[in-house]
Amino acid sequence: ETPIRKICCIGAGYVGGPTCSVLALKCPDIQVTVVDRSELRINQWNSSKLPIYEPGLDEIVQKCRGRNLFFSTDMVPALKEADLIFISVNTPTKTFGLGKGRAADLKFVESCARLIADVCERSKIVVEKSTVPVRAAASIVNILKANTKPGVSYQVLSNPEFLAEGTAVNDLTNPDRVLIGGEISEDGKRAIAALSWVYQHWVPAEKIIHMNTWSSELSKLAANAFLAQRISSINAISAVCEATGADVSEVAKAIGLDSRLGPKFLQASVGFGGSCFQKDILNLVYISESLNLTSVAAYWQQVIDMNEYQKMRFGQRIVQAMFNTITDKHITVLGFAFKKNTGDTRESPAIYVAKHLLEEGACLHIYDPKVERAQILLDLDQPDEKENSCVRIFDDPYEAAKGTHALVICTEWDQFITYDYQRMYDSMLKPAFAFDGRKILDHAALTKIGFHVETIGKRPGQRFQEQNWAGANGM
Ligand code: NAD
Ligand code: UDX
């Protein structure tokens, strides 16, 4: 007998959408319905332009949608029919009340639990896929138990998602591991086995790890904290490099060759962004404080503080290099997404840098291959793109660069590496600056063209001192 025939997933976001698309692709015998209360999002999932950009996702959705993959706002019937329900709604940082600015807001998770208890007439497995504080499953269990219809029971599992944006399809197809946390009881074990069966359609059994619910919940927060910690660590070293003449790329290479450390996640940058790292670490800090573990809280808080410092340093460096004033100067920002291969700008360091430049009086020309124009304006609190506005958004990087004093790279898009920088240079005001916040460009080549180049974790080229200033325009 097939234990799971129908799955419903609440939340058609960056996690729910790609996860269920891959699930539907790999499990043709399971019907997957993704529900969301946002009609706009569901309409987009049902259209030819999906609400999120993720390499390889369009093809999968096209293949499965209408076959065993459905997107709907009609939550009640989908929940009633399902054998297993994923909760993958957002769990943002609280913006008010107790734990404001740090604790995770579980109101959406709670409302899902209440709805499930309200409408379901037979027993189900409820899977917490959203990232939550440790022991959140206990709250879900309590809400379900207090509202369950007679004769119905629930098993609540923790199954955190480890996909990274921009590589979601690959991460989901070939996960390093799948974590399933549940109760140690017989019912708990049966539920864990059922969810494992779903994943075993494509994930090797040895990669599916079972553990207690609290370990599973904490592992997700810990994994993100460790990943972000590596970035803050190398970024801290990048500041030392800039002060001493060491090169952070060389240091990272040397560190990464130690097999105990490994080469990944050692890329110094303008700072980490994305919807998860900051939120989840703040959540860990808040939990630690609530448990009176103040030293633990302070330890992890430092990962966030170092990231703020890194973003600030980069912003200040741009102003300093441009003779301590950028008032009325035009600056091209290349990249607005928080990383390449996504259109997502949540917590993007580009937002911080752009705001800093605007506060200093600069006018920005912004180009990103995937971020929507309206999203950039929203992130920068710009009501509308007017003729005389200090934020202009371009569809073409060369048009963006024309007549500006500087290029600022905020996202590591591959296409930025191969641009014709001579062409850009020729159309820019002189002296022309290039600030590479991602360390992706050929700095020697840029310097040769004539740019004054600055990057993370490396002393600026000597171009400036060597350059003959006479005739330089744009000052
Ligand atoms: P998201 O904001 O993209 O999507 C969440 C969706 O849930 C939204 O479309 C929203 O309309 C819907 N929603 C909220 N409350 C609802 C309700 N009561 N009923 C129906 N729909 C509701 O968020 P996301 O990026 O997909 O993240 C979801 C969860 O997964 C978060 O807990 C996040 O921490 C975690 N996570 C995210 C990533 C990532 O890369 N984005 C990776 C791993 C884990
Ligand atoms: C992260 C986790 O990697 C993923 O496992 C989890 O499920 C969700 O959070 P995501 O935020 O999508 O994924 O992207 P990630 O690749 O982790 O990058 C996060 C940020 O760190 C980006 O801004 C990226 O540019 C930056 N980064 C990453 C660096 O600055 N240096 C690095 O070496 C790696």
Image: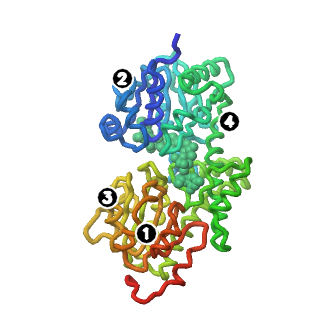
Q: Is mark 4 within 8 Å of ligand 1?
A: no
Amino acid type, mark 4: Ser
Q: Secondary structure at mark 3?
A: loop
* Structural crowding at the residue carrying mark 2, measured as other residues with C-alpha within 10 Å and reported as few (<14), some (14–19) or many (≥20): some
Q: Residue at x 54, y 62 (%)?
A: 439
The image shows residue 74 at horizontal and vertical percentages of 35, 29
State yes or no: discs 1 and 3 in contact (Cβ < 8 Å). Answer: no
Q: CA distance from mark 2 to mark 3?
A: 36 Å
Q: Is mark 1 within 8 Å of ligand 2?
A: no
Closer to the N terminus: mark 1 or mark 3?
3
Amino acid type, mark 1: Leu
State yes or no: discs 3 and 4 in contact (Cβ < 8 Å). Answer: no
Question: Could you tell me how many numbered marks the image carries?
Answer: 4
Closer to the N terminus: mark 1 or mark 2?
2
Q: Residue at x 37, y 78 (%)?
A: 429
Residue on which the image places disc 4: 215
- Does the rendering let one see residue 7? yes
Which quarter of the rendered picture does the C terminus lie within? bottom left
Residue on which the image places disc 1: 407
Residue on which the image places disc 2: 67
Which of the labelled discs sits on residue 395, or is there none?
3
Q: Is mark 3 within 8 Å of ligand 2?
A: no
